[in-house]
């Protein structure tokens, strides 16, 4: 028998009840041992009875304190009926019908008991016979070992499920567990290592434990090794103790001794290879730890799985771990639920505390550790204490969180620590290119360092790896590290970023040598002269970035007696007010000088000409000069300038003497391509915007050129010599309307990775373009282009293909050979035929965008795209159907069908796309019904529907009736719990959230959100968890719920 509970804590997981000595030392003993080995706390009377206790009393008490049990019949059935315990019978050499009807051997044994006991026993036996259980004769051909294994597996699975549901502090685990389990692929007969990485306090260990509990029953032996990082640092035992733990768990032998780590490795190789193991290594931070505990896949028996949690992704990469998951921070609804359970003992904030709770959650920013700590701390406190705690957090960070997060910082090399603090104080949200320029100017190896910080989960890269991001608590930790030694003396901080502190230090000349970096986002309140004088005391200042002063440029400042520190390596001053740099500023270390929108006419004062070997970047554009002063004096000083952006009709004639110029950027007024440009042998980037009519034939002299960008030019032909630029990686042609073709020898650009032709007059592409083996990005926007090269599939490295041409009718079949293609965007192409039938071969494809295509259906093979995340079909008027097996797109998150007027129905299989978050049916007027089970899409966050859907039933979660442009009446009432909030968007002439219904809507949904769109106003309702919403769009002049009239 077995019983389970999610309401109370039990002393035992399983209570074994049996009668007869014939099974006590055989079947029952084997079952008991198998349950114990699986980690299931099991009661068996001859093992747990204490001396001096009466057997009957002990048994009854044990039954009541077990999760599962197996026959002390009457009492067990009472517990089964009256408590939340569940009983499961094991039919060992007896059939359920014999127990149910008391026939055969059961009937003979039953007849021997007294009559007064018979009735109770008869009822209990009949009930037990009707329960779902295990029958030896019907399982595994009667093999007891396999029979016991099946029982243990099923009980383990039930216990795992119960424990997950019973732990009310685990929020949002089901979807996260599913993601990890999908990578583990338990049924595949290989050895697989899966990594879980993320910042400290993000829930990595919690997730690993939940996955472990969920799947552990499927393995022969299991081991969960916690705190690998801390334990491995022990001076004598260290890794040896961790090896011993794994071997003890696997072999069930606690007497193992290990003399050295190498001996431990050899033992693990020999002992683990014969067992199907589930091994979890928690909080790994060094490759040595993995090599000692899970050195290679051949250590383990096929079918084994190893789960590794870490803050450092590089550890996983170095150990050749193929499956790496980022642990996702909590979404808003999950954070509310978790915080409320710790702070209020319920799923939602209590009345009067909702606003304060939301402030706490804004501070926590989805970090589970902070949410738990603050929830526990604020539990039981009154409103004033909450307010005081929130005010304190503005200046004093949460100690428990900082201690966990700082572990990652402490483990960094010194140079990486400096870069981390620079990002936290100055570069969060900055473009990656700017950050690299700043850090490299300051002498750091920026690219590698940023990669290391990202792998250690200390920074993030957002928007396609273009911008630096950082969690708010990590940013707060960086600020705290900078300020904590001198919290009340900002002039002793290494970095300054708070405007008031910068103003005060400069105004009072309090600068010190401790200051390394200053960034002022807003104009200072002190004069430029005072500011520069204040910088003079900051002898070790390396980075200075200033916003523009509000300067009247009619004011002439001819002399600058103040000075910049000579340690400066990066100087950026927008709107610099003086005509030159300070005369005494030696700038021996200066690498980057940026002074846009300034009135500088000469870098140094007269008579101070000097050569600056260090200067690598010079940015002088939009200079506020008179017409006669248009030529900036730079070559006179012998500057080996590396970067120049000018805004003249013709570049300065002297710039050809700047031998080390790296980047040249001309603005839209440029008319002539100076012949001197081709002499710049170090030039790596050339951007020309203007009315240039011809590219010089000797452009091939630019041997180092990597990027060539031409925009709004009158160029009709690219010279063949351009194909000899062996280092060219990017060629962009934008709005070159006169350009009709590309060079035939373009295939000679052996390193070309990006080719973009936007708004050009190109009529055909040379076949040789298909020989660009390194090309990763191809964009062709040419309205006269009629066909694509037949061998397009030879572009083996192509990852993104964007095409726009009104005359393209079909794709060549070879496109299906682009095995690394991740994104396909086809805009304004007629495509009178469907996509190639073998489209499903594009196994890495993640995004499809089609617009204005005349296709009637998609090929069935599209359902084979297992990595597809986004499918957008815009204004494909003739599209009649989607593939019936579209539900096989298991990774699909966005499905957008907009303006597909001929589309008639949505396949039922769409309900199997478990990751679908956004579903749009905008103006799909022929779609009249959605699948009934669409409510099973647990991840669906927004349904955008303006078609004529007459009925939509979301599995009793919410119901929408009559999606038509009529008056809207909303009814909201509590219903079955919904895991998360979701959005409903619709077209409506007025907001439905009128005051007449405010009492119904309050607390159930958020106010209606207007969305800016063309045409009719679009609105969205955000429905909160735990509520059902019905939208009734019948023609009514009054609210159907409150009865009040509508205007």
Image (tube, helix red, strand yellow):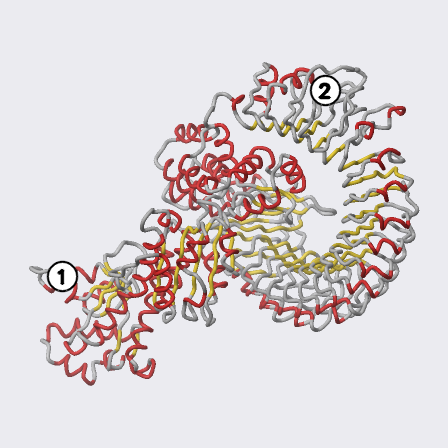
Farthest residue, direction bottom: 104
At x 82%, y 47%, the residue is 702
At x 38%, y 61%, the residue is 265
Given residues 238 and 1002, the one toward you in this image is 238
Q: Is residue 969 visible?
A: yes
Q: Quadrant of the N terminus?
A: bottom left
Tags 2 and 1 touching, CB below 8 Å: no
Q: Position of residue 238 (x, y in %)?
A: 34, 51
Query: SS of the residue at dot 1?
Result: helix
Given residues 647 and 746, the one toward you in this image is 746
Q: In which quarter of the image is the C terminus?
A: top right
Given residues 980 and 970, the one toward you in this image is 980
In this rendering, the answer to whether 638 lies above or below 894 is above
The image quarter containing residue 675 is top right
Q: Is residue 820 left or right of residue 158?
A: right
Q: Where is residue 176 in the image (x, y as percent from the top left)?
A: 47, 56
In this rendering, the answer to whether 270 lies above or below 440 is below
What residue does disc 1 label? 58
At x 66%, y 72%, the residue is 860
Q: Residue 582 — which label?
A: 2
Give the mark toward the camera: 2 or 1.
2
Query: SS of the residue at dot 2?
Result: loop
Q: In this view, does 609 lie to the left or right of 101?
A: right
Of pointers 2 and 1, the one earlier in the residue sequence: 1
Q: Residue 313 — which label?
A: none
């Amino acid at each position: 028998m077995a019983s389970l509970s999610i309401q109370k804590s039990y002393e035992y997981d399983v209570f074994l009840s049996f009668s007869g000595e014939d099974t006590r030392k055989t079947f029952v003993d084997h079952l008991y041992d198998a349950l114990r080995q699986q980690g299931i706390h099991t009661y068996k009377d001859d093992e747990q009875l204490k001396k001096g206790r009466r057997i009957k009393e002990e048994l009854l008490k044990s039954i009541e304190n077990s999760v599962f049990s197996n026959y002390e019949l009457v009492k067990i059935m009472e517990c089964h009926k009256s408590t939340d315990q569940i009983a499961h019978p094991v039919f060992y050499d007896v059939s359920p019908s014999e127990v149910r009807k008391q026939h055969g051997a059961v009937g003979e044994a039953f007849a021997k008991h007294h009559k007064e006991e018979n009735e109770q026993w008869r009822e209990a036996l009949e009930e037990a016979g009707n329960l779902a259980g295990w029958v030896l004769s019907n399982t595994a051909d009667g093999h007891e070992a396999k029979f016991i294994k099946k029982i243990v597996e099923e009980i383990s699975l039930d216990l795992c499920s119960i424990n997950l549901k019973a732990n009310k502090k685990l929020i949002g685990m089901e979807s996260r567990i599913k993601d990890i389990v999908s990578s583990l692929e338990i049924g595949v007969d290989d050895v697989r290592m899966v990594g879980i990485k993320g910042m400290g306090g993000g829930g990595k260990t919690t997730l690993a434990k939940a996955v472990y509990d969920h799947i552990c029953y499927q393995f022969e032996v299991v081991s969960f090794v916690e705190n690998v990082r801390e334990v491995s640092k022990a001076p004598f035992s260290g890794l040896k103790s961790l090896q011993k733990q794994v071997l003890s768990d696997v072999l069930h032998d606690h007497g193992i001794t290990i003399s050295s780590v190498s001996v431990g490795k050899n033992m693990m190789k020999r002992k683990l290879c014969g067992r199907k193991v589930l091994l979890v290594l928690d909080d790994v931070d060094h490759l040595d730890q993995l090599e000692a505990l899970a050195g290679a896949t051949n250590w383990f028996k096929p079918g084994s799985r190893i789960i590794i949690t870490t803050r450092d992704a590089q550890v996983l990469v170095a150990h050749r771990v193929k499956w790496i998951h980022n642990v996702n921070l909590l979404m808003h609804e999950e954070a509310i639920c978790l915080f409320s359970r710790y702070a209020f003992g319920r799923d939602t904030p209590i009345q009067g505390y909702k606003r304060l709770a939301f402030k706490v959650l804004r501070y926590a920013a989805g970090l589970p550790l902070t949410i738990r700590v603050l929830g526990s701390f604020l539990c039981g406190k009154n409103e004033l204490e909450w307010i005081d705690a929130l005010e304190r957090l503005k200046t004093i960070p949460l100690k428990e969180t900082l201690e966990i997060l700082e572990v990652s910082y402490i483990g960094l090399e010194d140079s990486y620590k400096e870069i981390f603090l620079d990002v936290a104080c100055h570069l969060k949200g900055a473009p990656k290119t700017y950050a690299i320029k700043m850090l490299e100017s300051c002498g750091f190896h920026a690219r590698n360092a940023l990669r290391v910080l990202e792998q250690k989960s200390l920074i993030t890269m957002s928007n396609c790896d273009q911008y630096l991001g950082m969690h708010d608590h990590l940013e707060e930790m960086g600020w705290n590290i900078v300020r904590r030694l001198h919290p009340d003396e900002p002039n002793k901080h290494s970095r300054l970023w708070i405007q008031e502190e910068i103003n005060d230090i400069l105004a009072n000349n309090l600068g010190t040598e401790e200051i390394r970096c200053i960034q002022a986002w807003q104009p200072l309140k002190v004069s430029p002269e005072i500011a520069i004088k204040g910088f003079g005391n900051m002898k070790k200042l390396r980075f200075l970035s200033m916003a523009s002063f509000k300067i009247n440029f009619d004011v002439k400042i001819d002399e600058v007696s103040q000075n910049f520190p000579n340690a400066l390596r990066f100087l950026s001053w927008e709107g610099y007010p003086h005509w030159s740099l300070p005369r005494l500023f030696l700038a021996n270390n200066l690498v980057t000088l940026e002074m846009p929108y300034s009135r500088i006419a000469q870098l140094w004062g007269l008579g101070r000409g000097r050569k600056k070997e260090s200067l690598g970047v010079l940015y002088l554009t939009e200079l506020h000069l008179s017409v006669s002063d248009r030529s900036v004096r730079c070559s006179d000083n012998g500057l080996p300038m590396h970067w120049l952006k000018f805004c003249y009709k013709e570049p300065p004639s002297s710039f050809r003497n700047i031998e080390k110029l790296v980047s040249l950027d001309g603005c839209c007024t440029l008319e002539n391509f100076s012949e001197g440009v081709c002499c710049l042998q170090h030039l790596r980037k050339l951007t020309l915007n203007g009315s240039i009519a011809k590219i010089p034939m000797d452009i091939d002299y630019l041997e180092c050129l990597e990027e060539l960008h031409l925009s709004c030019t009158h160029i009709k032909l690219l010279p063949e010599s351009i194909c000899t630029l062996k280092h060219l990686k990017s060629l962009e042609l934008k709005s070159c309307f006169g350009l009709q073709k590309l060079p035939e020898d373009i295939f000679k650009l052996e390193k070309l990775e990006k080719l973009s032709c936007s708004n050009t007059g190109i009529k055909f592409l040379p076949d040789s373009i298909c020989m660009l083996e390194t090309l990763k990005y191809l964009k062709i926007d040419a309205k006269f282009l009629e066909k694509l090269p037949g061998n397009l599939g030879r572009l083996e490295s192509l990852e993104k293909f964007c095409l726009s041409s009104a005359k393209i009718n079909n794709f060549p079949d070879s496109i299906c050979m682009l095995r690394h293609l991740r994104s396909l965007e086809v805009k304004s192409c007629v495509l009178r035929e469907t996509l190639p039938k073998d489209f499903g071969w594009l196994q890495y494809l993640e995004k499809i965008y089609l617009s204005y295509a005349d296709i009637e259906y998609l090929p069935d093979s599209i359902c084979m795209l297992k990595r597809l995340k986004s499918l957008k079909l815009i204004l494909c008027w003739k599209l009649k159907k989607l593939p019936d097996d579209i539900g096989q797109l298991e990774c699909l998150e966005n499905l957008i069908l907009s303006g597909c007027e001929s589309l008639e129905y949505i396949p039922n299989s769409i309900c199997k796309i478990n990751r679908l978050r956004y579903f749009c049916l905008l103006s799909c007027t022929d779609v009249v019904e959605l699948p009934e089970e669409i409510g099973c899409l647990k991840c669906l966050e927004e349904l955008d529907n303006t078609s004529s859907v007459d009925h939509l039933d979301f599995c009793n979660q919410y119901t929408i009736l009559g999606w038509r442009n009529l008056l809207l009446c909303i009814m909201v009432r509590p219903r079955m719990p919904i895991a998360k909030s979701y959005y409903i968007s619709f077209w409506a002439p007025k907001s439905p959230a009128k005051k007449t219904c405010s009492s119904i809507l309050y607390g159930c949904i958020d106010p209606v959100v207007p969305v800016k769109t063309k045409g009719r106003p679009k609105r969205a309702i955000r429905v909160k968890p735990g509520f059902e919403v019905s939208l009734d769009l019948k023609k009514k002049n009054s609210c159907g719920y409150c009865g009040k009239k509508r205007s």
